[in-house]
Structure formats: C-alpha cells, structure tokens
Amino acid sequence: MIRVLVADDHPVVRGGIVALLAAADDIEVVGEASNGREAVDLALALAPELVLMDLRMPELNGDEATALILQANPAIRVVVLTTYETDASILTAIEAGASGYLLKAAPQEEILAGIRSVARGEVALAPSIAAMLVGRVKTRAITLSPRETEVLGLVAQGMSNPAIAKRLFLGEATVKTHLLHAFEKLGVSDRTRAVTKAMELGLL
C-alpha cells in the first residue's frame, strides 16, 4: 500500500482527492492537511510514503512546505497537485524537491499513475509540464557567438548586409554566413524572425 497524506486548503477539492485515492486498491490516505504548516506537521508525525501537495495554501505555500518536509525526512516523496502551470510555479516546486507535478484538471487515471510512479522512485510530470520544461532546456541551449550577436544586433537596427559588412570591416559573404549560422541556431529562416526570436530569448 502507498501511504499518502493529502494537503489542500479547499475542503471540497480535498474531499474529492481523498475519495479518488480511497477508491484505489493500492493507496491508503493516512491524513489530511488544510494548510502548509499542517502538512509539514502531519508529514513528520505520520511519515507517509508520499505527500500530495497543493501549491497555494495558507500559512505555508506548497513549495515551502515541501522543502521543510524533505529537510526533515528525505525519504518522503512529494507530488504537487495544482491548477497552476506557470514556469515560475513549476521550477519553484521542483527546486524545493518535489518528485512530481500534476494538474488537478488531468484525468483521474493520470493522477493515480503519477502517484504510483513517484512511489516507485520515478518522476511524474503532467505532459504539458514536461513539454514546457523541455522547451526551457532547449531555449537555454541556444547561444550565439559574439560576432553573430553583433551582426544580428545591426540587423535589428535596420542595416543591410552591405552596410553591416562596411561597419564591421567584413566581406558581405562573411556577414551572410554569420546570419545563416544564427538562423540555424534560432530555428528561423528570415532576418525579421531571427531578430524577434533573439529578443524573445534575451540574446539581444
């Protein structure tokens, strides 16, 4: 049996989660917490295998409660179950040590599967969350050389290839090569999109 503590400040939502888990043959709900502080106290007192943690709660947020629980008992696993899927919320929860991040709007079987995965020592992420994190990793991997950045910066100022070549004392073919390399790295095919994409990524 997977011993689970449910932490959620909304009684109706918490009741629905408890009912869902209670219907599963391999899950036992050992406690319920209505705020972050209570979640920490009960987790340390009951030592469940897993805490199903809401993110926004009174007294302590889910990420704060997660960090405190894992500091005191690293054997406990925490799965965030929330309605929030912003970048900041996800990263904060994962940095706090959560082993899973699931959405309340997900199908019930997906939530149960996530709990079982984390209980086995795996990581469980809602598909949309996983896609978002992969996108962030890919974004972070994009780097332009100093010269590519310089050339693209001049394109952003509205300069043509000949004008850029004259400004940087380069051949026009060299300017074009730098731009093509930048296009390839950014996954774009024209000057305008290259500039806007570089700006979106904070590279310009």
Image: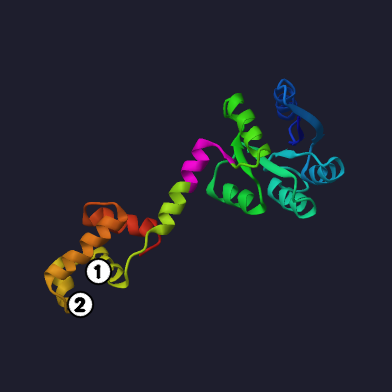
Give the image quarter of residue 158. bottom left
Seen at 20% across and 77% down, the residue is 168
Q: Is residue 58 visible?
A: yes
The percent coordinates of residue 52 (x first, y second) are 71, 37
Q: For this view, does 161 lie left or right of residue 151?
A: left
Circle 2 residue: 168
Mark 1 residue element = helix
Q: Quadrant of residue 99?
A: top right
Highlighted magenta segment, given as a residue range: 124-133
- Magenta stretch holds residue 126: yes
For the point 58% across and 47% down, the residue is: 90
The reply to whether discs 2 and 1 touch (Cβ–Cβ < 8 Å) is yes
Number of numbered labels in the structure image: 2
Residue that badge 1 annotates: 151
- Identify the residue shown where x is 78% and y is 47%: 59
Where is residue 195 drawn, in percent x and y? 29, 59
| Residue 160 visible, this angle | no
- Assign the C terminus to one quadrant of the image: bottom left
- Image quadrant of residue 102? top right
Residue type, numbered disc 2:
Leu
Q: Name the element at disc 2.
A: helix
